[in-house]
């Protein structure tokens, strides 16, 4: 049974802590094997979290016996690590055990030097500060997470769930990871190499562009183009591109490809259509084009995606 410790401290981020608890501490009687998880603290048992909510934890002086340490967050400017905590994390890592950090938790690992000369990430909001503080770290932009055999980092709060699901998959297999994802009411399809920014954003507000989006979504199986969308909006292509970026936040071509990929992923998960038929149903000119965009945006082939996440 893998022993897991979730590190808490006074002021710990409640959401990331809750993600760690939901992923690794929630009882799962449907599984024969699962983690044994504790929420621990090195300073006190009564802690405050985000918004001043109270938290009671288990006080510990050692991480002996821990196989996996989760660091939900860490104050980005707190470089003065308590000596006992620093020593225990270093010793745990030296024993070959695993450490996962969520969001700003990567700063704790950075201050301890455990990320030097290796790839790592954190929330995009802290990217500049992270790179200034830790110039020896190979910072990774536009990824959901980085997972080595001993250390993993997630790009942000929601990406923590992606990282956790990948760890569960490695520990217990794809079927159990998918079951956990279903319990979380989310699709376990996001990959570590995928951009942490939304590829197919919704309009920031209702505008003249909104009906065009609905029109295009209803015709994804047809080979409609950006020029067709502009004509439907009775705008010149140049004017349409400008209005689209203003209200949606990306180019019409990026949005259209993203919508087609979303539809393709759904078909790959829910049907046994061959790749050519999936491409045709999503408006791609060929299966080759589908494969190209799939690899470019998601980092896997359509077949690999279906093998992992299809029913």
Image (cartoon, rainbow, N blue to C red):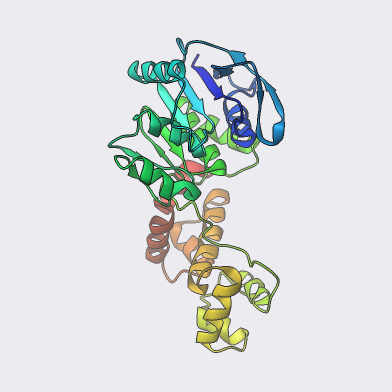
Percent position (x, y) of residue 234? 62, 89
Percent position (x, y) of residue 14? 64, 33
Percent position (x, y) of residue 240? 56, 82
Q: How many labels does the image show?
A: 0
Percent position (x, y) of residue 254? 48, 68
Pick out the residue farthest to the front. 80
Note whether 300 is above or below 2 in the view shown: below
Res 287 → quadrant: bottom left
Q: Which residue is drawn at 30% across and 34% down?
A: 116
Note whether 183 is above or below 187 in the view shown: above
Q: Which residue is drawn at 58% across and 88% down?
A: 235
From the viewer's perspective, is 206 left or right of 99?
right
Res 222 → quadrant: bottom right
Note whether 108 is above or below 248 in the view shown: above
From the viewer's perspective, is 168 left or right of 219?
left
Q: Quadrant of the C terminus?
A: top right
Note whether 227 is above or below 34 in the view shown: below
Q: Which residue is drawn at 47% across and 64% down?
A: 279
Q: Which residue is drawn at 41% across and 24% down?
A: 98
């Amino acid at each position: 049974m893998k022993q897991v410790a979730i590190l808490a401290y006074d002021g710990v981020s409640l959401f990331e802590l809750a993600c760690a608890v939901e992923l690794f501490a929630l009882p799962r009687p449907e599984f024969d094997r699962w983690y044994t998880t504790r929420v621990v603290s090195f300073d006190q048992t009564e802690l405050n979290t985000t918004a001043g909510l109270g938290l009671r934890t288990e006080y510990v002086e050692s991480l002996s016996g821990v196989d996996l340490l989760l660091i939900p967050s860490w104050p980005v400017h707190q470089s003065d690590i308590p000596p006992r905590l620093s020593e225990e994390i270093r010793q745990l890592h030296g024993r070959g055990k695993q450490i996962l950090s969520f969001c700003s938790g990567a700063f704790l690992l950075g201050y301890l030097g455990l990320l030097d000369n290796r790839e790592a990430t954190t929330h995009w909001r802290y990217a500049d500060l992270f790179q200034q503080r830790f110039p020896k770290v190979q910072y990774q932009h536009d990824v959901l997470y980085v997972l080595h055999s001993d250390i993993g980092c997630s790009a942000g709060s929601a990406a923590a769930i992606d990282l956790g699901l990948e760890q569960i998959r490695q520990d217990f297999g794809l079927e159990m990871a998918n079951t956990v994802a279903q319990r979380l009411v989310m699709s376990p399809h996001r990959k570590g190499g995928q951009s942490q920014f939304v590829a197919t954003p919704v309009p920031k507000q209702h505008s003249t562009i909104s009906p065009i989006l609905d029109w295009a979504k209803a015709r994804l199986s047809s080979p409609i183009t950006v020029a067709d969308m502009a004509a439907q909006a009775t705008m010149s292509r140049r004017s349409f591109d400008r209005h689209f970026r203003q209200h949606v936040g990306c180019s019409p071509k990026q949005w259209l490809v993203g919508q087609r990929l979303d539809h393709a992923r759904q078909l790959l998960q829910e049907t046994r259509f061959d790749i050519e038929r999936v491409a045709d149903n999503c408006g791609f000119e060929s299966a080759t084009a589908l494969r190209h965009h799939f690899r470019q945006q998601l980092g896997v082939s359509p077949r690999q995606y279906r093998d992992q996440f299809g029913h």
